[in-house]
Amino acid sequence: MDDVVRQETGAPAPAPASPRRRRFIARGAAASLAAASGAATLPGAVQAAAPEILPDNLPPNVPQWMREPGAGFLNPPYGLPSPFEKNVLRKLPDQPAAFPTATRTPLQHLFGSTTPNGLFFERHHAGVPAIDPAQHRLMVHGLVERPLLLDMKTLLRFPAVSRSHFIECSGNGSAEFKAPGRGTVQDIHGLLSGAEWTGVRLADVLAEAGVLPAARWLLAEGADAAAMTRSFPLAKALDDALLVYGQNGEMLRPEQGYPLRLLLPGFEGNMSVKWLRRLKVGDAPFHTREETAKYTDLMPDGTARQFTFRMGVKSLITAPSARQVLDGHGFREISGLAWSGHGRITRVDVSVDGGRRWQAAALDGPVQRHALTRFRFPWRWTGQEAILQSRAVDEAGNVQPTRDALVGSVGRNSAYHYNAIQSWKVAADGEVSNVHV
Ligand SMILES: Nc1nc2c(c(=O)[nH]1)N[C@H]1C(S)=C(S)[C@@H](COP(=O)(O)O)O[C@H]1N2
Ligand SMILES: [Mo]
């Protein structure tokens, strides 16, 4: 994978081997000689993975890793990816910041439509609180008959549901309003992840509290130092909102809101309040800082749109994508992700000629509401320059806009809700780059 990453980051070739690295190579070489002569191999040899040892491990030879038993169980007790995948990581933005605010998911390295928990993007307004679940409570109050103070044990006794949903930061891709970003798809669109969440229907908890007739809105508050607060309509709470504690089969990760998170499927990421400690029921929105000073969309006429909850229909080709280099002509599958805050994805079309001709891609099923959907399209690269694009359609009939159409309708001032068609240019030498067409 080293070469791939070097291509992606545009980083220069590695500096001459450090003394430590040289020792590894020496050991690797020694090990390969030892293996060839049938002698016992060095346990550290595998770490070297230096090209020097490869030929001996290829057929018809018996590879080194078949010559002695492998590592034992519980090594480590919580499993980790292969050390050869060490470059598949979340990533901070390239520009150093005094207070980094987010890490991004390596979309170009992932398969299917589930983001592994260790690679789920992170966006924290004031870091990750270390919450003891035994000391965590959810307060439900305001326009209710019976205010509640729920501990985690009680919440875990409610009937549970598991559902796949994406979370996308409303700021995802917003630098594209201005100029084409020069990084990878991770750098450009990596504030997006998807998981199977497990938790309690908010409607069930509200039924327990008894919502009063005047109720129309709720306020959610997080237990982090930012005390993140947002208002959302009661209709959403009763429709499909969840209080989740599970993420891809295990408890939430601390960075995703352990031990309890509000999940508002399809709504902009900031509304899925992490470390949820309080829900207040009211008759009107609460107009917190996060929905007045922040998370409003500045329009060309100087007005701002407030409460733009739903994420627009969007798709991206993740393979191939920016900073990769196609390693040969012939068949390859184009694949990517589509999602919408307005329901299911019903169709994704792919163009390989900059939008002149479109053809339907295949969708991996089952296609779920407000969930990442993987699409696939067979392609034969002849070595000519190509512009790859994908265009998603959702069940409400929304069609992903071109960049010109999006900028034409909302201008370039907004820092949120960028969902335009993404174009990747494949140059004749196979290099893929981000372009605005
Ligand atoms: N309590 C709390 N909830 C929060 C945030 C936060 O800083 N504090 N960040 C929000 C933002 S802006 C986004 S995009 C999502 C990100 O979720 P993730 O970190 O699980 O990817 O969480 C939202 N919920
Ligand atoms: Mo966000």
Image (cartoon, helix red, strand yellow):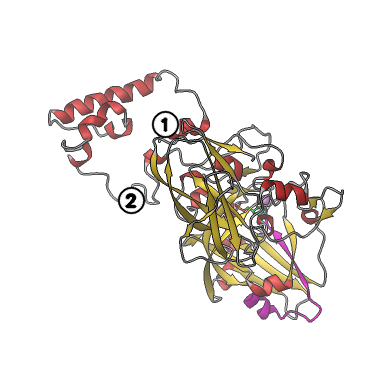
- Of pointers 2 and 1, the one earlier in the residue sequence: 1
Residue sticking out furthest to the front: 356
Marks counted in the figure total 2
What residue is rendered at 37% in x and 38% in y? 84
Is residue 430 or residue 11 the one in the foreground?
430
Quarter of the view holding residue 341:
bottom right
Residue sticking out furthest to the right: 302
Quarter of the view holding residue 139:
bottom right
Instruction: Look at the numbered discs 2 and 1 and tell me whether their residues touch, using CB distance below 8 Å.
Output: no
Q: Which residues are magenta?
A: 203-223
SS assignment at label 2: loop
Q: Position of residue 432 (x, y in %)?
A: 51, 36
- The quadrant of the image that shows the C terminus is top right
- The quadrant of the image that shows the N terminus is top left
> Mark 2 against mark 1, which lies toward the viewer?
1
Q: How far apart are labels 2 and 1 at the CA level?
A: 31 Å
Can you see residue 288? yes
- For residue 3, the mark is 1
Label 2, on which residue?
74
Q: Position of residue 244 (x, y in %)?
A: 58, 65
Please check the rendered image and state whether residue 74 is part of the magenta-colored stretch, yes or no.
no
Is residue 308 or residue 41 the one in the foreground?
308
Q: Position of residue 86 (x, y in %)?
A: 43, 39
**Amino acid type of disc 2?**
Leu
What residue is rendered at 46% in x and 30% in y? 429
SS assignment at label 1: helix
Q: Position of residue 8 (x, y in %)?
A: 50, 34
Does the closest atom of ligand 1 sit within 8 Å of the Cβ of label 2? Answer: no
**Amino acid type of disc 1?**
Asp
Residue 204 versus residue 419 in the image, above or below: below
